[in-house]
Amino acid sequence: MKNIIKNESFEVNFLSDTKTIICSAIEPYILDEVFKFTFSEISEFVEVNDVQKFVFDKSKLTVFNQESMVWYHVDWKRKMLNFGLKKHYKILPADNIFKFSVEMGKKRIAAENPDFNFNDFDIRYFDTVEEALNA
């Protein structure tokens, strides 16, 4: 495992044998500018490396920034698709309100961005990083 990014909000590692990035949120809330900056750094890595799977561990989050999530789906994921990154596996906090907020956020993204298609991606949810890695 190779650490590619470490800052106040994220730890991002690359597993070359499985071509997987593990992005772990390490703070309960992440500012939009930190989120976008970090994910822009991740894109630079994806552009020059063969990355097949992105595991996003959100289990430490208590709240998410809706603006960040819209950008993450509509802009960032589309850009990553151009580099072959289609698998996006997520670990959510064990919090039903957070999970409900995610579902509402997805509905909002779909309604406000009709040209964005969630089905272009392999998006799955897991309880642990280990489960996501084994999928």
Image (cartoon, rainbow, N blue to C red):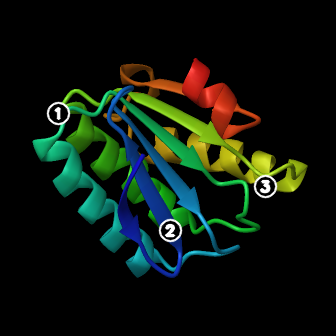
The amino acid at mark 1 is Phe
**How busy is the neighbourhood of tag 3: few (under 14 within 10 Å), some, or many (20 plus)?**
some
Of labels 2 and 1, earlier in sequence is 2
Q: Where is the C terminus found, in terms of image quarters?
A: top right
Disc 2 and disc 1: Cα gap in Å? 22 Å
Q: Secondary structure at mark 1?
A: loop
The amino acid at mark 2 is Phe
Residue drawn at x 29%, y 31% is 85
Indicate the quadrant where residue 29 lies: bottom right
Give whichever of 106, 45 is nearer the camera: 45
Q: Compared with residue 90, is residue 125 higher up or lower down, i.e. above or below?
A: above
Q: Nearer the viewer, mark 3 or mark 2?
A: 2
Indicate the quadrant where residue 66 lies: bottom right
Disc 3 and disc 2: Cα gap in Å? 19 Å
Residue highlighted by disc 3: 98
Q: Nearer the viewer, mark 2 or mark 1?
A: 2
Residue 22 shown left or right of residue 15 in the figure: right
Residue 8 shown left or right of residue 51 in the figure: right
Residue highlighted by disc 1: 83
Residue drawn at x 79%, y 47% is 100
- Give the x, y percent position of residue 64: 64, 65
The amino acid at mark 3 is Phe
Of labels 3 and 2, earlier in sequence is 2
**How busy is the neighbourhood of tag 2: few (under 14 within 10 Å), some, or many (20 plus)?**
many
Give whichever of 68, 37 is nearer the camera: 37
Give the numbered dot on residue 120.
none
- Give the x, y percent position of residue 99: 77, 46
Residue 26 shown left or right of residue 14 in the figure: right
Indicate the quadrant where residue 118 lies: top left
Residue drawn at x 22%, y 44% is 46
Residue highlighted by disc 2: 10
Q: Secondary structure at mark 3?
A: helix
